[in-house]
Every structure is written in structure tokens, then in C-alpha cells.
Image (cartoon, coloured by chain):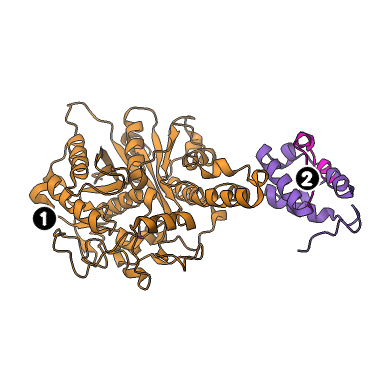
């Protein structure tokens, strides 16, 4: 897999399906279950360790950095996606 | 069978699960043990081509997802994956259903010598290369040596006493012995007990090479583990997990369980001699053998077979020979003594459980597994080591020796149960 070219076209080149698959691999669930409104804890049985592992994988994959204080705001898949869009738009 | 005149709670072995370099499951392991088949080969888990010792006894073709979901498999170390697989197998073999019993009726004592060694090494490399922020949040639970017991309790719903016993290469001998005591003192009806080990890693292999304890017979893997042979030159690192279901005898009988054998007891002592070298006179080991006989009300004439620790080191095999003679007197020269490590390699913290299983099967199947590669016997090792060929024999009581770095000795006694 090639790296997404987020520097060339901020945000626009991010592929939700790719993040879905990455999250599904980490959380051990079917990719179809990783949808915007889905709760990591309630719907995908992710504990705090799973979330940390997922964030680390996201940071590595997309070359972004999630400040520790924002970790607790990552409740739903959509929260993570929003963060990713914003972070990859940043200069 | 007790020397204090009180009725002792008897402990039955009602289930066995094995994931080893010489096979998975009772039938496959027993076939290897009786056919004299070696599980030793060139190391595949990492590139060992620069190591003085390049061979080990690896568990091949293990698919963890047959025993756990993918996420669990990814979040535990290899020793735990092997351990959970063996525990599931043992529980299925026993027919015991912890989920239908009281929450603390079934406990778990599964030991490991090294724990999640490969995860420690991987995590440390991440720290060096990429910094603190990239250490896995699962690092701690993956590395600690008690977590197999915790994982098994979670997955198999066993809420009784839960911990690990660590005594290097005697760990699972002690685990089985202690688990039996948990049942005897009334803290559980049944215990899932044994050992799990997966330490064929770059650091640990290198460390054992530096210790000078391993065979360097790289061009002859199947012939490398040769206990009691004059040309033995060290042990062979092995991995795997062997777990048993121990159960209060009357409980096992009441539910009509198949009883493999009785765990008569464990004799436990310390050498008080050296970190890594055995007492050359075998005193600590002899005391362990004498202790279990005394506790179980046995005399030397009752012992029909000894499964030796027999790691294939020059010092260890000689010291153990002296220990067996000291503990059993004349009886030592009249009974079969074999080292199944000649086939399985040395499973470290899982070795004691594998060898206890070999004793159980010898009792159940009237057959003594051999010591393979015994071509030119060491004249100082002069017992009947059952060279190269399995031998039919009725075994009513067997002893299984396990010794660990630190001078830990555990001797288990296993006995036939009348039908």
C-alpha cells in the first residue's frame, strides 16, 4: 500500500475505506462495522488500550499527532475521522 | 497413602492439552514419544545463522485463531497463545464445564519461565528506534509471566485461585504440584495447571549461547539432544505448552470423568549450591525425590519409572544419575529411567508438564518412552535409560524430575488409578 498523499491535496485524498480497514484490523472487527456514528467502546468493544493502539497506528499511517488531552474525545469513529481531516489540513 | 494418618484429598488428572514441537494433542505427542521422533530443527523464528547454536525445538504450523479470536491473539505473547490453546484442549479432554460450576470452583496456575520474551525484545527495539510514544499499550500485559493464567481464566470462565509459579525450568512441575495442593486444601474443586513457554528469541538464544549451556550440533538437529550419551554437549531450547485439568478425585468419579492418573504429590527442594550449575552430588534433587515419596506414602520399591530432567548437559545428567541412585538405592538400577527431552528438546517452564504427561501416558498405555540418541553411553551414567526404543512395561507409579536455574527442584509422583 502506498502512503496517502495528504501533503499534495490536504484532506481531500484521505480515503475513509482505508481508515475503516486499518481500524477494523486493530479492533478485530469486520470493516463494515466501522461507521461514522459507531462508538468504539459500546459498539466495537474497544477498551482504552485498544484506542491507544489505534491512535498510534493512525499517527504512523498518516503522519499526524494526536495530543494526549484529545484522546478522551475519541468516542466515535466519526471523532477520529474529523481529527484526521483537521490534522492533515494543518500546515 | 498419607504418613500423618489423615485421609488425604486425592487429585485426579482428568484432562490433558499439549502443543509441542513433537505434536499437538495427546495422540500426536504419544506417537512421537513412542516412535522416537525428534522435534528439533534449524530455527525459523529469526535468523540464527550467526549464532553458535542455530537449532531449537519449535512448534510448527500453529494457528492461534483455531483457539482464540484475532484480536486476542494479537494482544498476547506467543507463550500465552500456546497456553490458551493447550488449556482449551485440556478442558475439552476433561469434559469439565467451569461455566456451569460455582465461580471460584475452578482455578488456574499456568507457569512460564520467561514470559513474553519476544515482546520485551520487540518493545525495547521500538523504544530505542522510535521513542516512548511508540511502545505498545499492550506491552505490560504481553510481557508478564502471570498473564497466561489470567487469560485462561477470562477465556474459560475459571474464577478460582489464579497465579503463576516461577522456578525457571522447574516452573510447571511446581505449578502442577501447587495446583494439586490448592485442591487438597479445599480452595478449588478443579485446577487448570501446567506451563507455557515461547522463548526462542534472539536475545535469549544469545544469552544461553553465552552461558555455554546449549548444544552446538547444528548439522545434526535430530541427534543434538542426547541425554546420558558420552558425546552430549548441551540442551536444546524448546517451546510449547502442556496443561492438565486436575480435579478432586470424588468429584471426577461422581461425574463419570475419564481419569488419566492420580497426581500423588510434589517434592520441592533447593540445591543451595549455585545459580546455574547443579549440585554435582545431586543432593537437592535426591531430597526432592525422597520428599515426594515420603509425602505420598511410597517407598523406593513402589517406583516403576523415572522421567528424568535429563537435559543433555554434561554436568546435569551426571548429577541426576547420582540423585536417582541416592534417592532410590538398589531400585534405581532395576527400573527404566528415560529423558523425553531427547525428542522434545527442553521446554523450560513447560518441560515439567510435558514430562508429567509422558509419565501419565506411560501409566495409561503400559509403555515407556525411550531416550533417543543414546549411542555411546557415558560410563558414569549407568542406569537403564531405555535407549532408542520404547519399551512395553506396566507402570503403576512414576516420578517426573524438573530442575531449574536457581537450584529449584520439583519431583512429581504420578500413579495409576484402579478402574
Residue identifier under label 2 = A65
- Is-magenta flag for residue B93? no
Question: What residue is pinned by disc 1?
Answer: B333
Residue B348 percent across, percent down from the top left? 37, 51
Q: Quadrant of residue B262?
A: top left
In the picture, the quarter occupied by the N terminus of chain B is top left
Between disc 2 and disc 1, the foreground one is 2
Residue found at the far bottom of this picture: B219
> Element type at marker 2?
loop
Q: Residue at x 75, y 49 (%)?
A: A59
**Residue B50 placed where, x, y %?**
46, 67
Task: Judge by depth and name the residue closer to the eye, B205 or B359.
Answer: B205
The one of A23 and B130 positioned closer to us in this rendering = B130
Q: Secondary structure at mark 1?
A: helix
Tell me the magenta residue range. A63-81
Residue B228 lies, in percent from the top left, at: 22, 61
Q: At 45% from the left edge and 57% from the top edge, which residue is drawn?
A: B200
- Looking at the image, is B245 positioned above or below residue A69? below
Q: Colour of chain B?
A: orange
Residue in the picture at 78% in, 45% down:
A65
Res A7 label: none
Give chain A's shade: purple
Amino acid at each position: 500500500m502506498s502512503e496517502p498523499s495528504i501533503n499534495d491535496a490536504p484532506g481531500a485524498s484521505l480515503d475513509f475505506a482505508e481508515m475503516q480497514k486499518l481500524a477494523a484490523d486493530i479492533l478485530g472487527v469486520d470493516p463494515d462495522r466501522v461507521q461514522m456514528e459507531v462508538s468504539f467502546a459500546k459498539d466495537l468493544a474497544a477498551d482504552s488500550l485498544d484506542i491507544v493502539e489505534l491512535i498510534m497506528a493512525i499517527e504512523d499511517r498518516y503522519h499526524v499527532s494526536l495530543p494526549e488531552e484529545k484522546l478522551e474525545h475519541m468516542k466515535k469513529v466519526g471523532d477520529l475521522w474529523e481529527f484526521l481531516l483537521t490534522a492533515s489540513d494543518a500546515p | 497413602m498419607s504418613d500423618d494418618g489423615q485421609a488425604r484429598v486425592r487429585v485426579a488428572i482428568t484432562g490433558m492439552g499439549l502443543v509441542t514441537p513433537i505434536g499437538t494433542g495427546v495422540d500426536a505427542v504419544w506417537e512421537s514419544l513412542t516412535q522416537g521422533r525428534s522435534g528439533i530443527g534449524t530455527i525459523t523464528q529469526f535468523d540464527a545463522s550467526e549464532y553458535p547454536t542455530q537449532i531449537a525445538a519449535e512448534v510448527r504450523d500453529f494457528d492461534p485463531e483455531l483457539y482464540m479470536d484475532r484480536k486476542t491473539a494479537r494482544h498476547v505473547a506467543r507463550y500465552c497463545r500456546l497456553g490458551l490453546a493447550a488449556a482449551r484442549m485440556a478442558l475439552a479432554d476433561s469434559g469439565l464445564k467451569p461455566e456451569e460450576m460455582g465461580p471460584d470452583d475452578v482455578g488456574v496456575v499456568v507457569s512460564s519461565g520467561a514470559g513474553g520474551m519476544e515482546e520485551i525484545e520487540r518493545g525495547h527495539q521500538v523504544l530505542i528506534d522510535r521513542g516512548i510514544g511508540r511502545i505498545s499499550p499492550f506491552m505490560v500485559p504481553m510481557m508478564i509471566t502471570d498473564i497466561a493464567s489470567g487469560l485462561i481464566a477470562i477465556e474459560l470462565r475459571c474464577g478460582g485461585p489464579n497465579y503463576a509459579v516461577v522456578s525457571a525450568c522447574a516452573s510447571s512441575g511446581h505449578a502442577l504440584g501447587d495446583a494439586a495442593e490448592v485442591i487438597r486444601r479445599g480452595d478449588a474443586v478443579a485446577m487448570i495447571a501446567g506451563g507455557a513457554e515461547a522463548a526462542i528469541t534472539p536475545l535469549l538464544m544469545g544469552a544461553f549461547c553465552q552461558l555455554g549451556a546449549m548444544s552446538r550440533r547444528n548439522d545434526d538437529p535430530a541427534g543434538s539432544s542426547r541425554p546420558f550419551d558420552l558425546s552430549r554437549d548441551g540442551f536444546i531450547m524448546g517451546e510449547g505448552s502442556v496443561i492438565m485439568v486436575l480435579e478432586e478425585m470424588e468429584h471426577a468419579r461422581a461425574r463419570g470423568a475419564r481419569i488419566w492418573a492420580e497426581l500423588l504429590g510434589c517434592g520441592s527442594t533447593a540445591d543451595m549450591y549455585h545459580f546455574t550449575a547443579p549440585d554435582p552430588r545431586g543432593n537437592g534433587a535426591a531430597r526432592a525425590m525422597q520428599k515426594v515419596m515420603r509425602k505420598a506414602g511410597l517407598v523406593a520399591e513402589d517406583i516403576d519409572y523415572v522421567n528424568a530432567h535429563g537435559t543433555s548437559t554434561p554436568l546435569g545428567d551426571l548429577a541426576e544419575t547420582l540423585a536417582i541412585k541416592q534417592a532410590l538405592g538398589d531400585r534405581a538400577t532395576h527400573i527404566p529411567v528415560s529423558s523425553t527431552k531427547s525428542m522434545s528438546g527442553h521446554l523450560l517452564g513447560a518441560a515439567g508438564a510435558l514430562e508429567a504427561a509422558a509419565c501419565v501416558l506411560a501409566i495409561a498405555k503400559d509403555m515407556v518412552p525411550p531416550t533417543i540418541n543414546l549411542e555411546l553411553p557415558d560410563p558414569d551414567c549407568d542406569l537403564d535409560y531405555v535407549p532408542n526404543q520404547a519399551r512395553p512395561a506396566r507402570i503403576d507409579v512414576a516420578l517426573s524430575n524438573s530442575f531449574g536455574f536457581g537450584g529449584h527442584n520439583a519431583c512429581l509422583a504420578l500413579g495409576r488409578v484402579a478402574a
